[in-house]
Amino acid sequence: MIFSRGGIRQALLACVLACASVSPAFAEARAPVEAIEVSARPITEFQVGHNQKLFGPLEFVGGLEMTASSRDFGALSAFRFLKPGGDFIGVADTGFWFFGTITHDADKRPSGVSDFRMQQMVDASGRPIEEKWEVDAEGLAVKDGIATVGFEREQRVVQFKIDPDNMKAPFKTLDYLVPARELRQNRGFETVAHANPHGQHEGGLVVVSEKSLDKAGNIYAAIIEGPRKGVFTVKRNGDFDITDGAFLPDGDLLLLERSFSMARGVKMRLRRIYGESIEKGAVADGPVLMEADMGYQIDNLEGLDVWTRDDGALMVSLVSDDNHSILQRNLYLEFILHQD
């Protein structure tokens, strides 16, 4: 076929336009990062109407009630500090990552949240996942630039490379050892934590379910990495379910627990599980350190992290999941855990 000079120009132009129209399809798809301004009202009393600071071995430092105009803000299920008491990463059970920084005043009390942003979890092609049941993220551990996340409903424990500007799909799926038939659909792994690097499990991952019970009524858990892998259980104490946990420097596991009834509302509890009781085939247990009900500044507390302050204080931080309900709040609470 012979083209005139004008025909050649038209054909070239058509080719350029066609290439321009299809080139986005070859570009990497990615979910946008949403910057969110978070307003934070200081909480100065843990027990409502009382200025008491000590609650068992825990000393209340301060807290924040967090609000934002974005409809995506909330449902904060788990978080970990990337820098002690400052920069953090977290997961929302609506299928979002979140990042930000906790700020503190001159008296070391939490004063606000800065640089907060959220990004939707994506599939292998980089496209946002819209179905909540696929991305019901509940547990989170962080180590060496890797985020390990426990998901409910579609039960799995998977790993992601941390990139606050472009979180991609997971690159690895881990064997969580607990038989899948034993995991209740909405009671899966809410605790994902790295053990003490110098302890018996050499920094390996430990997962604890919220309320997947064995025949004895204890809670399924597992050591899924390290030299002593295996399934164990945590003694269920009363009507409390497990919502998060983190290892203390001495090797014990600090668990955050929650109880709810329509009559009395929500309660929270912190329980210290002895590190030596976390073994394949064992029933792990330990004492309650603190318990609080609606007479305290609590809500649906689901996230916990442990960190060391610059003055050497051992700190415990908690966050709540508001379930995107006007009846609930997004809280950040901070305590010193006294060891003596």
Image (cartoon, helix red, strand yellow):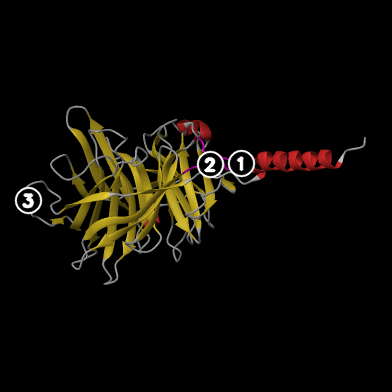
Q: Which residues are magenta?
A: 120-129
Q: Quadrant of the C terminus?
A: bottom left
Residue denoted by label 1: 125
Q: For the residue labelled by badge 1, is the local secondary structure a helix, a strand or a loop? A: loop
Q: Is residue 66 visible?
A: yes
Q: Dot 2: what SS?
A: loop
Quarter of the image for residue 237 reads top left
Of tags 3 and 2, the one toward the viewer is 2
Q: CA distance from mark 3 to mark 1?
A: 53 Å
Amino acid type at image mark 2: Val
Image quarter hosting the N terminus: top right
Image mark for residue 122: 2
* Label 3, label 2: how far apart the Cα atoms are: 45 Å
Task: Tell me the amino acid under the disc marked 3.
Answer: His
Query: Are the residues flagged by discs 3 and 2 in contact, CB closer than 8 Å?
Result: no
In the image, taking residue 157 as reference, residue 304 lies left or right, namely: left
Give 68 or 237, whichever is nearer the viewer: 68
- In the rendered image of this protein, does residue 146 appear above or below residue 191? below
The location of residue 194, given as percent across then percent down, is: 44, 56
Q: Is residue 266 magenta?
A: no
Residue at horizontal 36%, vertical 50%? 245
Q: Where residue 32 sits in the image (x, y, percent)?
A: 48, 45
